[in-house]
Amino acid sequence: MIHFKKGNPVQPPTIPTASLPDIVFILLFFFMTVTTIKDQNLLVENKLPQANETEKLTKTDRIIEVFVGHSKQTHGSSKEGVVQVQMDNRLVEMDDVGHQAVLALNNIPEHLRKIAIVSIKADHKVKMGTITDIKKQLKKVNLLKINYTTVEGDVFQNLKNGF
Amino acid sequence: MRSKRTAPDINAGSMADIAFLLLIFFLVAASIDNDTGLNRILPREHVKTTVNIKKRNLFEISINPQNDLMVEGELVEFKDLRGMTIAFIDNGGLVQGQKGFCGYCQGEQSAFLSEHPNQAIISLSTSRNSDYAFYVSVQNEIIGAYNFLRNREGLKLFGTDYESLVSNYNKAEVSVSEKSMLKKKIETLRLKYPQKLVEPETIYH
């Protein structure tokens, strides 16, 4: 026989929530350490091509970033949709890339300058002419270590995405 | 006389909410981006050296504005590129006993492909209107070919492949002695299959 308990109902046990803030703070600190906040406001389109034989750029203290892409639609500027180069948070002319790279190199600690890497972050729609020009500029200022920055993925996707 | 007062309780119930707000702010504003990419070293400017190389030791890849791939004078499919590159580098075209014979190569010893990985030079020419994405794909395949061969040698010599040697080397927690050992191994493999890539400025018509 089943007997149902009668009488005063049992109060559900309360869950202690005092440690909840601590847990959330730990999560917060975790995210603060593993993530990076983008310091550049992208002025050009930047969808990187894919590649799988890549090496990681883990040490960010020796990297000079060069963004290349069609400029984003900004308030009726005349340069809309033209392939542009962005360095140091602003658009630079092609002839100025070398000079700008040297300026960026000066911000890198002295002992790392010899192993500085220029990370070319070019949009997948950019034509090779622009890239060749950038490489010429970098050669002029003797910055020879470059990195074609990509996202991890299958190269055949590049072909499918269409040209 | 002072009356004994207890410190007033601070209501900590909203602490969790505040922390959550902060957390969400960081999740939105930050991004976990570990940049990856293909490392390349540009040649120096104003160093004009002419070296006589044999035709068989040069592997010519060119990309035209329509993103067609031409390898050694023939149109090829992109998916065949890696295999062809591996066959070229790893050919080891000399006979045993000849000077410059490649003892570790496993290629077909064809008379038209490279003599030794040391001699094998890849030439990659592009036109100004070729697509960057396609160029990156081709570079990826070339690096992939080298990685394949280095991995194979690494497994044979040290029991670990080249890529895991490199990723172990880049880890922060390895000791100095281990690091120098890894470096030695990596350099041995790199010497066996050195990457020699030239990018001529003009394309042949």
Image (tube, coloured by chain):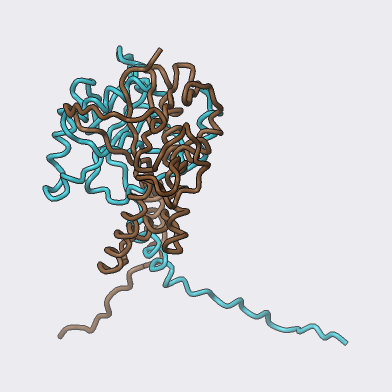
Give the quarter of the image for residue A116: top left
Tell me residue B194's x, y (percent).
34, 44
Residue farthest to the right, as pictured: A1
The quadrant of the rendering that contains the C terminus of chain B is top left
Q: B204 or A114: nearer the eye?
A: B204
> Residue visible at 41% across and 39% down?
B115
Tint of chain B: brown
Q: Residue at x 37, y 63 (%)?
A: A25
Task: Report whether B167 appears left or right of B42.
Answer: right
Q: Is residue A73 left or right of residue B51?
A: right
Say which residue appears at 41% left-offset and 57% top-offset.
B20
Return the x and y of residue A77 as percentages of the image width and height: 30, 15
> B12 or B189: nearer the eye?
B189
Give the mark count. Answer: 0
Q: Residue at x 48, y 41 (%)?
A: B86
> Where's residue B196, x and y in %?
33, 38
- Near-viewer residue (A154 or B13): A154
* Image hue for chain A: cyan
| Residue A27 seen in the figure | yes
Q: Position of residue B182 (x, y in %)?
A: 33, 62
Q: Based on the displayed image, in which of its 4 quarters is residue B198 positioned?
A: top left
Q: Nearer the viewer, residue A140 or B71?
A: B71
